[in-house]
Image (spheres, rainbow, N blue to C red):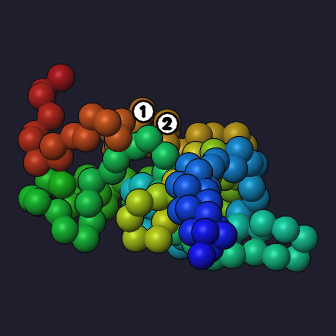
Amino acid sequence: MIRTLIIILVVIFACPAAKSETLPGPIPADVVRIVDGDTVRVRAHVWLDQSIEISVRIADIDAPEIGHPKCRQERMVADQAKAELTNLIGSQSVALHNVRLGKYAGRVIADIETSSGLDVGQALMALDLASPYEEAMDWCVEPPAP
């Protein structure tokens, strides 16, 4: 009985540690599909002749929602973000860095780098098609005139 309790406690306390692990990468992956401006579906090559298909949310950015936009402006920017992400990576191979478990929709979170070394999250933010995740933008507010 005591032994079983100890084993259960070890398992319970070991699980949160596993969830906080990060794989530094690079993990090579082929883009299967661009989901929206901050999520892609990839086939990640995790071991010799072994790969998994998984959705990856780009780390530290927030792009407007395609599925449930709050307004027409958000949908327009969401479409632009998805189109630009498609232009940046299309269906090429990418490298995933700092891969960790996400908390929604069975995705992982990672930095995504193109074969030329471009950080796609930074590129989307530079084009004002994404904002820092901690400072999520209200896409329904018209940007100020230059």
- The picture places residue 123, in percent across and down from the top left corner, at 49, 39
* Residue name at image x 42 percent, y 33 percent: 126
- The picture places residue 30, in percent across and down from the top left corner, at 69, 67
Q: Quadrant of residue 36?
A: bottom left
Marking on residue 122: 2
Quick one: which residue is furthest to the right in this view? Answer: 48
Q: Which secondary structure, mark 1?
A: helix
**Three-letter amino acid code of the residue under disc 1:** Ala
- The picture places residue 93, in percent across and down from the top left corner, at 71, 61
Is 38 positioned to the left or the right of 66 in the image? Answer: right
Marking on residue 55: none
Q: Quadrant of residue 143?
A: top left
Above/below status of 52 relative to 109: below
* Residue name at image x 75 percent, y 75 percent: 51
The 10 Å Cα crowd at callout 2, few under 14, some 14 to 19, many 20 or more, is many
* Residue name at image x 9 percent, y 59 percent: 71
Q: Which secondary structure, mark 2?
A: helix
Quick one: which residue is furthest to the front in this view? Answer: 1
**Three-letter amino acid code of the residue under disc 2:** Gln
Question: Looking at the image, is mark 1 or mark 2 nearer the viewer?
Answer: 2
- The picture places residue 95, in percent across and down from the top left corner, at 70, 52
Is 45 positioned to the left or the right of 144 in the image? Answer: right
Quick check: marks 1 and 2 in contact, CB under 8 Å? yes
Q: Which residue is mark 1?
A: 126
Q: Is residue 86 visible?
A: no
* Residue name at image x 77 percent, y 67 percent: 45
As measured in the structure, the alpha-carbon distance from the residue carrying label 1 to the one carrying label 2 is 6 Å
